[in-house]
Image: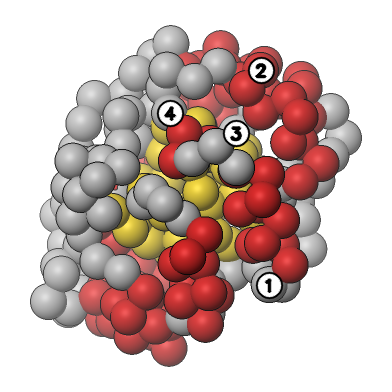
Protein backbone atom coordinates (compact mmCIF):
# COMPACT_ATOMS: atom_id res chain seq x y z
CA UNK A 1 0.00 0.00 0.00
CA UNK A 2 1.05 3.60 -0.60
CA UNK A 3 2.03 5.74 2.37
CA UNK A 4 -0.90 7.10 4.36
CA UNK A 5 -2.63 10.19 2.98
CA UNK A 6 -6.04 11.79 3.29
CA UNK A 7 -6.72 12.23 -0.42
CA UNK A 8 -10.13 11.05 -1.64
CA UNK A 9 -10.01 7.37 -2.59
CA UNK A 10 -12.86 5.66 -4.45
CA UNK A 11 -13.35 1.99 -3.55
CA UNK A 12 -15.87 0.20 -5.80
CA UNK A 13 -17.66 -2.65 -4.00
CA UNK A 14 -17.77 -5.78 -6.13
CA UNK A 15 -21.02 -6.72 -4.41
CA UNK A 16 -22.59 -4.73 -7.27
CA UNK A 17 -20.39 -6.30 -9.99
CA UNK A 18 -21.04 -9.39 -12.14
CA UNK A 19 -20.48 -12.33 -9.77
CA UNK A 20 -19.56 -14.59 -12.72
CA UNK A 21 -16.80 -12.22 -13.78
CA UNK A 22 -15.07 -10.80 -10.70
CA UNK A 23 -11.54 -10.84 -12.10
CA UNK A 24 -12.43 -8.80 -15.16
CA UNK A 25 -14.70 -6.51 -13.15
CA UNK A 26 -11.89 -5.66 -10.69
CA UNK A 27 -9.43 -5.01 -13.51
CA UNK A 28 -11.98 -2.85 -15.36
CA UNK A 29 -12.78 -0.79 -12.26
CA UNK A 30 -9.07 -0.16 -11.62
CA UNK A 31 -8.44 0.75 -15.25
CA UNK A 32 -11.32 3.21 -14.98
CA UNK A 33 -9.83 4.97 -11.97
CA UNK A 34 -10.70 3.00 -8.83
CA UNK A 35 -8.17 3.52 -6.04
CA UNK A 36 -9.09 0.49 -3.91
CA UNK A 37 -11.31 -2.55 -4.54
CA UNK A 38 -13.78 -3.21 -1.71
CA UNK A 39 -14.69 -6.85 -1.11
CA UNK A 40 -17.80 -7.59 0.99
CA UNK A 41 -17.77 -10.90 2.86
CA UNK A 42 -21.15 -11.85 4.40
CA UNK A 43 -22.00 -14.92 6.43
CA UNK A 44 -25.79 -15.03 6.68
CA UNK A 45 -25.42 -14.81 10.48
CA UNK A 46 -23.93 -11.42 11.38
CA UNK A 47 -25.85 -9.99 8.42
CA UNK A 48 -28.94 -11.40 6.70
CA UNK A 49 -27.18 -12.24 3.44
CA UNK A 50 -24.42 -14.56 2.20
CA UNK A 51 -21.87 -13.40 -0.38
CA UNK A 52 -18.57 -15.33 -0.59
CA UNK A 53 -15.48 -16.13 1.46
CA UNK A 54 -11.69 -16.34 1.49
CA UNK A 55 -11.40 -18.65 -1.52
CA UNK A 56 -13.10 -16.04 -3.69
CA UNK A 57 -10.81 -13.32 -2.30
CA UNK A 58 -7.77 -15.45 -3.18
CA UNK A 59 -9.11 -16.02 -6.70
CA UNK A 60 -9.62 -12.33 -7.43
CA UNK A 61 -6.35 -11.16 -5.81
CA UNK A 62 -4.23 -11.59 -8.99
CA UNK A 63 -6.71 -9.37 -10.87
CA UNK A 64 -6.23 -6.43 -8.46
CA UNK A 65 -3.05 -4.37 -8.85
CA UNK A 66 -3.74 -2.00 -5.95
CA UNK A 67 -5.40 -2.32 -2.57
CA UNK A 68 -7.74 -5.24 -1.80
CA UNK A 69 -9.96 -3.93 1.00
CA UNK A 70 -11.79 -6.83 2.66
CA UNK A 71 -14.88 -5.98 4.74
CA UNK A 72 -15.82 -8.88 7.00
CA UNK A 73 -19.51 -8.95 7.91
CA UNK A 74 -19.07 -12.21 9.79
CA UNK A 75 -19.31 -13.45 13.37
CA UNK A 76 -17.25 -14.99 14.83
CA UNK A 77 -14.25 -13.42 13.09
CA UNK A 78 -10.98 -14.65 14.56
CA UNK A 79 -11.06 -18.26 13.38
CA UNK A 80 -11.39 -17.08 9.78
CA UNK A 81 -8.80 -14.27 9.74
CA UNK A 82 -5.85 -16.32 8.54
CA UNK A 83 -7.72 -17.32 5.40
CA UNK A 84 -8.18 -13.68 4.40
CA UNK A 85 -4.55 -12.88 5.25
CA UNK A 86 -3.41 -15.76 3.03
CA UNK A 87 -5.80 -14.58 0.31
CA UNK A 88 -3.70 -11.42 0.07
CA UNK A 89 -5.89 -8.76 1.68
CA UNK A 90 -4.19 -5.39 2.20
CA UNK A 91 -6.86 -4.17 4.64
CA UNK A 92 -9.13 -6.41 6.75
CA UNK A 93 -12.04 -4.68 8.47
CA UNK A 94 -14.02 -6.35 11.24
CA UNK A 95 -17.17 -5.08 12.94
CA UNK A 96 -17.12 -3.76 16.48
CA UNK A 97 -20.48 -5.50 16.96
CA UNK A 98 -19.22 -8.92 15.77
CA UNK A 99 -18.11 -10.15 19.18
CA UNK A 100 -16.89 -9.27 22.69
CA UNK A 101 -13.17 -9.14 21.84
CA UNK A 102 -12.73 -6.79 18.90
CA UNK A 103 -9.45 -5.51 20.38
CA UNK A 104 -8.02 -9.01 20.09
CA UNK A 105 -9.27 -9.24 16.51
CA UNK A 106 -7.57 -5.95 15.56
CA UNK A 107 -4.33 -7.11 17.19
CA UNK A 108 -4.48 -10.36 15.25
CA UNK A 109 -4.98 -8.53 11.94
CA UNK A 110 -2.06 -6.18 12.57
CA UNK A 111 0.04 -9.03 13.87
CA UNK A 112 -0.39 -10.69 10.47
CA UNK A 113 1.10 -7.66 8.73
CA UNK A 114 -2.25 -6.47 7.35
CA UNK A 115 -3.86 -3.05 7.92
CA UNK A 116 -6.66 -3.31 10.49
CA UNK A 117 -10.08 -1.73 9.97
CA UNK A 118 -12.89 -1.29 12.48
CA UNK A 119 -16.45 -0.99 11.14
CA UNK A 120 -19.29 0.66 13.08
CA UNK A 121 -22.94 -0.10 12.35
CA UNK A 122 -25.29 2.90 12.11
CA UNK A 123 -26.57 2.28 15.65
CA UNK A 124 -23.09 2.26 17.19
CA UNK A 125 -21.83 5.66 18.40
CA UNK A 126 -18.44 7.08 17.44
CA UNK A 127 -17.46 7.02 21.11
CA UNK A 128 -17.59 3.20 21.12
CA UNK A 129 -14.31 3.32 19.17
CA UNK A 130 -12.57 5.64 21.66
CA UNK A 131 -10.35 2.99 23.27
CA UNK A 132 -9.36 1.49 19.92
CA UNK A 133 -8.02 4.51 18.05
CA UNK A 134 -4.40 3.42 18.50
CA UNK A 135 -5.15 -0.09 17.27
CA UNK A 136 -6.66 0.69 13.88
CA UNK A 137 -5.53 1.87 10.45
CA UNK A 138 -9.07 2.55 9.24
CA UNK A 139 -12.50 3.20 10.70
CA UNK A 140 -15.42 2.27 8.45
CA UNK A 141 -18.62 4.19 9.13
CA UNK A 142 -21.57 2.20 7.81
CA UNK A 143 -24.08 4.58 6.24
CA UNK A 144 -26.52 1.72 5.66
CA UNK A 145 -27.30 -1.33 7.75
CA UNK A 146 -24.84 -3.92 6.40
CA UNK A 147 -26.05 -6.83 4.33
CA UNK A 148 -27.16 -5.47 0.99
CA UNK A 149 -26.07 -3.09 -1.74
CA UNK A 150 -28.31 -0.41 -3.17
CA UNK A 151 -29.78 0.88 0.12
CA UNK A 152 -30.53 4.48 1.05
CA UNK A 153 -27.80 6.57 2.72
CA UNK A 154 -28.52 7.22 6.44
CA UNK A 155 -27.86 10.95 6.83
CA UNK A 156 -27.52 10.88 10.63
CA UNK A 157 -24.11 9.25 10.17
CA UNK A 158 -22.53 12.43 8.79
CA UNK A 159 -22.19 13.95 12.26
CA UNK A 160 -20.67 10.68 13.47
CA UNK A 161 -17.99 11.03 10.78
CA UNK A 162 -17.28 14.55 12.01
CA UNK A 163 -16.93 13.33 15.61
CA UNK A 164 -14.59 10.52 14.60
CA UNK A 165 -12.44 12.93 12.59
CA UNK A 166 -12.10 15.15 15.66
CA UNK A 167 -11.38 12.16 17.93
CA UNK A 168 -8.64 10.91 15.59
CA UNK A 169 -6.73 14.20 15.45
CA UNK A 170 -3.40 13.64 13.71
CA UNK A 171 -3.48 9.85 13.85
CA UNK A 172 -2.81 8.21 10.46
CA UNK A 173 -6.21 6.49 10.33
CA UNK A 174 -8.43 6.41 7.25
CA UNK A 175 -12.14 7.15 7.61
CA UNK A 176 -14.04 4.99 5.16
CA UNK A 177 -17.73 5.38 4.34
CA UNK A 178 -19.75 2.38 3.19
CA UNK A 179 -23.31 2.46 1.90
CA UNK A 180 -25.40 4.65 -0.37
CA UNK A 181 -22.49 6.71 -1.68
CA UNK A 182 -23.13 8.55 -4.96
CA UNK A 183 -22.33 12.05 -6.28
CA UNK A 184 -25.03 13.52 -4.00
CA UNK A 185 -23.98 11.88 -0.71
CA UNK A 186 -20.18 11.77 -1.27
CA UNK A 187 -19.72 15.52 -0.62
CA UNK A 188 -21.52 15.28 2.73
CA UNK A 189 -19.08 12.73 4.14
CA UNK A 190 -16.00 14.16 2.41
CA UNK A 191 -16.66 17.53 4.01
CA UNK A 192 -17.12 15.83 7.40
CA UNK A 193 -13.70 14.18 7.16
CA UNK A 194 -13.92 10.90 5.24
CA UNK A 195 -11.23 9.91 2.74
CA UNK A 196 -12.17 6.41 1.48
CA UNK A 197 -15.54 6.24 -0.26
CA UNK A 198 -16.97 2.79 -0.96
CA UNK A 199 -19.54 2.71 -3.75
CA UNK A 200 -21.19 -0.35 -5.24
CA UNK A 201 -24.32 0.36 -7.26
CA UNK A 202 -23.27 3.93 -8.09
CA UNK A 203 -20.05 2.67 -9.77
CA UNK A 204 -21.14 -0.55 -11.49
CA UNK A 205 -24.33 0.81 -13.07
CA UNK A 206 -24.25 1.69 -16.75
CA UNK A 207 -21.31 -0.49 -17.81
CA UNK A 208 -19.84 -3.96 -18.07
CA UNK A 209 -16.31 -5.36 -17.78
CA UNK A 210 -16.04 -5.33 -21.57
CA UNK A 211 -17.62 -1.86 -21.96
CA UNK A 212 -16.45 -0.19 -18.75
CA UNK A 213 -16.48 3.48 -19.76
CA UNK A 214 -19.58 4.00 -17.61
CA UNK A 215 -17.62 2.85 -14.55
CA UNK A 216 -15.05 5.56 -15.24
CA UNK A 217 -17.70 8.21 -15.65
CA UNK A 218 -19.34 7.13 -12.38
CA UNK A 219 -16.04 7.09 -10.46
CA UNK A 220 -15.07 10.53 -11.78
CA UNK A 221 -18.46 11.98 -10.81
CA UNK A 222 -18.18 10.71 -7.21
CA UNK A 223 -14.57 11.86 -6.90
CA UNK A 224 -15.27 15.33 -8.34
CA UNK A 225 -18.22 15.88 -5.99
CA UNK A 226 -16.21 14.76 -2.96
CA UNK A 227 -13.13 16.82 -3.83
CA UNK A 228 -15.24 19.93 -4.44
CA UNK A 229 -16.73 19.58 -0.94
CA UNK A 230 -13.24 19.44 0.57
CA UNK A 231 -12.58 22.89 -0.91
C1 LIG B 1 -23.21 -3.26 2.55
C2 LIG B 1 -21.82 -3.37 1.96
C3 LIG B 1 -21.49 -2.29 1.03
C4 LIG B 1 -22.35 -2.25 -0.21
C5 LIG B 1 -22.37 -0.85 -0.72
O1 LIG B 1 -23.40 -4.25 3.48
O2 LIG B 1 -20.86 -3.40 3.00
O3 LIG B 1 -20.11 -2.31 0.68
O4 LIG B 1 -21.90 -3.09 -1.21
O5 LIG B 1 -23.27 -0.83 -1.79
P1 LIG B 1 -23.96 0.52 -2.27
O6 LIG B 1 -22.85 1.46 -2.67
O7 LIG B 1 -24.79 0.07 -3.42
O8 LIG B 1 -24.74 1.05 -1.12
ZN1 LIG C 1 -18.68 -3.06 2.55
User: Are discs 2 and 3 less than 8 Å apart at CB?
Assistant: no
Q: Nearer the viewer, mark 1 or mark 4?
A: 1
- Going from N to C along the chain, the mark reached first, 2 or 1, is 1
Q: Residues within 10 Å of mark 4 (few under 14, many from 20)?
A: some
Q: Nearer the viewer, residue 17 or 108?
A: 108
What numbered label is drawn on residue 194? 3
Find residue 196 and report its horizontal and vertical position in percent. Answer: 55, 45
Q: Residues within 10 Å of mark 2 (few under 14, many from 20)?
A: few
The residue that appears at 81% across and 41% down in the rendered structure is 134
Find residue 163 and report its horizontal and vertical position in percent. Answer: 67, 16
Q: Is residue 118 visible?
A: yes
The residue that appears at 67% across and 23% down in the rendered structure is 164
Q: Nearer the viewer, mark 3 or mark 1?
A: 1
In the picture of the structure, the residue carrying the numbered disc 2 is 127
Label 3 and label 1: CA atoms lie apart by 26 Å
In the picture of the structure, the residue carrying the numbered disc 4 is 121
Amino acid sequence: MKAFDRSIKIAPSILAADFANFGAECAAAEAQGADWIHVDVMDGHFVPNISFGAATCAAIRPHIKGVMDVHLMISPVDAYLQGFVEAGADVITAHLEAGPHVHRTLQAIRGSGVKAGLALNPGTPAEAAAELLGDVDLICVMTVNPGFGGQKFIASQVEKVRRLRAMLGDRPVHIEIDGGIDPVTAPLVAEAGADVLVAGSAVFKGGTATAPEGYGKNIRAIRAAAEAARG
